[in-house]
């Protein structure tokens, strides 16, 4: 039976969707924040698998498409790709999709430990199988950060990160087959910014890319809460507007020059940039990158830092080879590029509830 999003919102909010859709902007904002808080409620013990999936879904993922489905038994949870939520223009080989699945797996494993379960993950073809068995209750700063982690697309304060904190961030990225390149030198960061701007220009001139991006944009609280996915404008530091107003005006405020200036300023305001690379380019390694990427984001959050993806140099195929040469990494693939530093809090993005992503085992 298909999930009725109106029923989900009534459950989460205790109000009818109709009252939200005709609410004033301030009331719509409050209702949106109520939904975001409900999704990020503390981990409960029951229903166990549903709670594990809820925490898994709080993971980072490309365009907030949430491209996953879950099948759960008492001893195993399988995370599979939802190919209906692919983004072929930006991610033609499904690289980001499988990185997203790895991010979700890492959250699930950390949440399982907090419920007294040992979780072991392995990739079987297109599926991540997470085997569960009784174990000690183990919580950590990374687990505690799951509810608060977010990708923060804003200016940071430009201050450096302490050496011991950099060490923790590097440790968080440790994963077999994955390497992390940290750059805190402003000259190297400026060079990365040059690649980001080249990639951004190429993408913004690509109609298929822009059409796909706009498809996943949510311009108002009402639109975001109705979909429970996508890129909400205020979560990126932009104002919320009704979709019927924002879409016709999009080409006026989303311009190549404006976005390039914003990316340059954002990178200049950051404490550093990290590039995750893999030994081999296949789905198992992409999942491994996702796990390392998620731990990095959680560790940054636990340290009071923010981070954001600047993946243009790895998304534009013609630019990727040049970026590889600049990094000097030989045959390795650069998978993920992120900036980090201290920055502001922005509204949290939404996630579909477990009922919408769990299939019968």
Image (cartoon, rainbow, N blue to C red):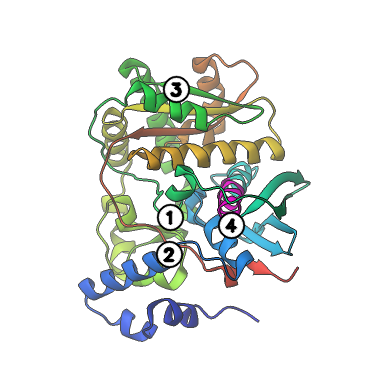
Q: Main secondary structure of the magenta part?
A: helix
What numbered label is drawn on residue 41?
A: 2
Do labels 4 and 2 touch, CB within 8 Å?
A: no
Q: Residue 202: where, in percent of width, then height?
A: 45, 36
Crowd class of label 4 (few under 14; some 14 to 19; many from 20; radius 10 Å): many
Q: Is residue 288 left or right of residue 126?
A: left
Which residues, given as a range, are shown in magenta? Answer: 103-115
> Which residue is at 34% across, 17% downward?
185
Any magenta on residue 141? Answer: no
Q: Secondary structure at mark 4?
A: loop
Q: Could you tell which of marks 4 and 3 lies nearer the N-terminus? A: 4
Crowd class of label 1 (few under 14; some 14 to 19; many from 20; radius 10 Å): many
What numbered label is drawn on residue 182?
A: 3
Q: Secondary structure at mark 1?
A: loop
Q: Quadrant of residue 301?
A: top left
Q: Is residue 359 left or right of residue 59?
A: right
What numbered label is drawn on residue 147?
A: 1
Q: Residue 21: where, in percent of width, then height?
A: 33, 80
> Which residue is at 74% across, 44% downward?
123
Crowd class of label 3 (few under 14; some 14 to 19; many from 20; radius 10 Å): some
Q: Secondary structure at mark 2?
A: loop
- Front label number (4 vs 1): 4
Q: Residue 334: where, in percent of width, then height?
A: 56, 27
Nearest the camera: 194 or 147?
147
Between the residue at mark 1 and the residue at mark 2, the CA separation in whole angstroms equals 8 Å
Q: Could you tell which of marks 4 and 1 lies nearer the N-terminus? A: 4
**Where does the C terminus fall, quadrant-wise?**
bottom right
Residue identified by numbered label 4: 115
Q: Is residue 153 left or right of residue 213?
A: left
Do labels 1 and 2 touch, CB within 8 Å?
A: yes
Any magenta on residue 106? Answer: yes
- Front label number (1 vs 3): 1
């Amino acid at each position: 039976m298909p999930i009725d999003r109106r029923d989900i919102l009534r459950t989460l909010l205790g109000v009818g969707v109709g009252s939200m859709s005709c609410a004033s902007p301030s009331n719509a904002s409050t209702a949106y924040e109520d939904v975001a808080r409900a999704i990020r409620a503390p981990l409960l013990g029951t229903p166990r698998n549903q709670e594990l999936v809820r925490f898994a879904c709080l993971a980072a993922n490309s365009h907030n498409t949430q491209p996953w489905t879950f099948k759960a038994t008492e001893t195993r949870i399988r995370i599979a790709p939802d190919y209906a939520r692919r983004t072929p223009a930006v991610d033609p080989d499904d690289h980001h999709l499988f990185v997203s699945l790895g991010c979700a797996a890492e959250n699930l494993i950390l949440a399982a430990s907090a419920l007294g379960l040992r979780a072991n993950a392995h990739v079987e073809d297109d599926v991540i199988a997470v085997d569960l068995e009784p174990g000690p209750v183990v919580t950590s700063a990374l687990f505690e950060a799951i509810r608060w982690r977010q990708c923060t697309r804003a200016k940071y304060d430009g201050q450096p990160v302490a050496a011991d904190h950099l060490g923790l961030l590097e440790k968080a990225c440790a994963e077999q087959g994955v390497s992390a390149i940290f750059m805190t030198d402003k000259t190297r960061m400026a060079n990365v910014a040059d690649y980001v701007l080249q990639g951004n220009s190429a993408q913004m001139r690509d109609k298929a890319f822009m059409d796909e991006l706009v498809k996943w944009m949510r311009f108002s609280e009402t639109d975001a809460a109705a979909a429970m996915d996508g890129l909400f404008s205020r979560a990126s530091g932009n104002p919320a507007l009704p979709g019927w107003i924002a879409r016709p005006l999009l080409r006026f405020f989303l311009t190549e020059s404006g976005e390039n200036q914003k990316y340059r300023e954002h990178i200049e305001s950051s404490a550093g940039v990290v590039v995750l690379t893999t030994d081999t380019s296949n789905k198992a390694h992409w999942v491994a990158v996702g796990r390392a990427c998620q731990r990095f984001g959680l560790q940054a959050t636990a340290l009071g830092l923010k981070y954001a993806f600047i993946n243009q140099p790895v998304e534009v195929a013609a630019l990727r080879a040049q970026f590889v040469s600049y990094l000097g990494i030989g045959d390795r693939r650069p998978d993920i590029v992120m900036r980090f530093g201290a920055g502001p809090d922005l509204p949290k993005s939404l996630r579909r509830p477990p009922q919408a992503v769990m299939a019968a085992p």
